[in-house]
Amino acid sequence: MFQILVIDDDPAVQILLKRMLEKHGYEVVGASNGEEGIKQALIYHPALIICDWIMPGMNGLEVCQCIKANPELSTTFFILLTSLDSVADRVKGLDAGADDFITKPIEHNELQARVRAGLRLHQLSRDLQIQKRILEAELEEAAEYVRSLLPPPMTEPLRIDFRFIPSRQLGGDCFDYYWLDSNYLAIYLLDTAGHGLRATLPSISVLNLLRSRALKNLNYYQPSEVLKALNDTFQINYQNDKYFTIWYGVYNRIKHQLVYSTAGHPPAILTTAKSTDVTQAKLLRTPGIPIGMFPQVKYVDGFCDIEKDSILYIFSDGAYEIAKSDGMLWGLENFVKMVVSSNYHLDQIINQLTGLKQQEAFDDDLSILQLKFN
């Protein structure tokens, strides 16, 4: 049974409304002023509130603003009861958050029609909130599943750490690193276009494919060949029109050499300390369009010697495509400067990026891999 709260300083109006509504099976609670009405609303969480506009003390507009500001009452439908019927007054009421109006003197059929319409919208809002919570719970479960697939941090013979922060909608970030043999380490990070499970599932498929080395007759030591094989396998015509970017590298720990190839992905950042106060940054990227866009694409390899105490950062675009308060994006150039000046602390980088965003959660997944070469 729906519960309705009537707020009016006139006892006669309260009694009239209560009789009209109870006649149609509604449960009605009354309050004689705005302050009491807000207390009743917090206790009963009514589906609908009918509140007089003109009252001593807190008026109907103030009550409406207070009700609408409370997340616990977000689905409550609010009707202002008023003898004011000018357009300006209606605009003022709508600006305060009112959902509908009933004009005095109260007409029985109009009251019932507006109450029925208000309760339908209340029920729809409740259903949408329930579905939203279910979806958020499912996305959180999916994010936890992605976390469970990620490799543990590594300490020897080089240190690898990472931060993975899924967005509210969950994106397509995924990464992995593992030894191809005792001397060669494969590292990659990919980002599928879009959000939600449709972006996450292809990323997981790629991770499982590479981790199990299911692509036969493939030289996993040559990054460009790996990207070509992935492009042949994940054409968007057959994969729900989802493409992805990827940075893939292989590190030879004996020769201290890195071979890498990229497909539309942000460059990795290799930092090398030249002195106590000078750090050199090199961007590691090769030409190549995202995986899945076009068939028979050729990818190329890049080569880099790794000096002692160098640090490699591999990341998704969620690390720098962050809207600032002025509406501008943070940008890759600013992110590179931040990385160079961060004294190599991942948490410091994350804290600075968190301070940039305008919303509670990031708009896109944020993934950063950090490799410290001893």
Image (cartoon, grey):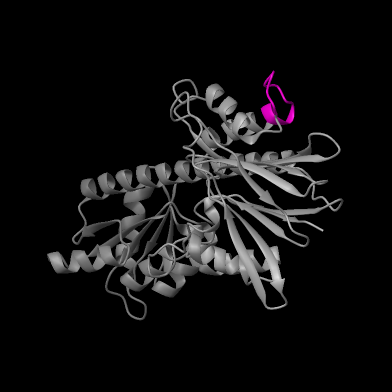
319 or 58: nearer the eye?
A: 319
286 or 150: nearer the eye?
A: 286
Magenta stretch encompasses residue 350: no
User: Is 234 located above or below residue 6 in the figure?
Assistant: above
Q: How many numbered markers are drawn?
A: 0
253 or 170: nearer the eye?
A: 253
Q: Most extreme residue toward the bottom, as rendered? A: 57
**Residue 53 image position (x, y, % from top left):** 28, 69
Left or right of 245 in this view: 162: right
Visible residue check, residue 23? no
What is the chief secondary structure element of the magenta stretch? Answer: loop
Left or right of 38 in this view: 348: right
- Magenta stretch: give its range: 208-219
User: Is 37 located above or below residue 227 in the figure?
Assistant: below
What residue is rendered at 86% in x and 38% in y?
182
174 or 22: nearer the eye?
A: 174
What residue is rendered at 58% in x and 36% in y?
200
Visible residue check, residue 192? yes
**Residue 337 image position (x, y, % from top left):** 56, 68
Magenta stretch encompasses residue 209: yes
* Among the 4 quarters of the image, the one containing residue 138: top right
**Residue 277 image position (x, y, % from top left):** 68, 78
What residue is rendered at 79% in x and 39% in y?
184
Position of the C terminus by quadrant? bottom right
Left or right of 174 in this view: 42: left
* Among the 4 quarters of the image, the one containing residue 79: bottom left
What residue is rendered at 25% in x and 66% in y?
93
**Residue 294 image position (x, y, % from top left):** 43, 27
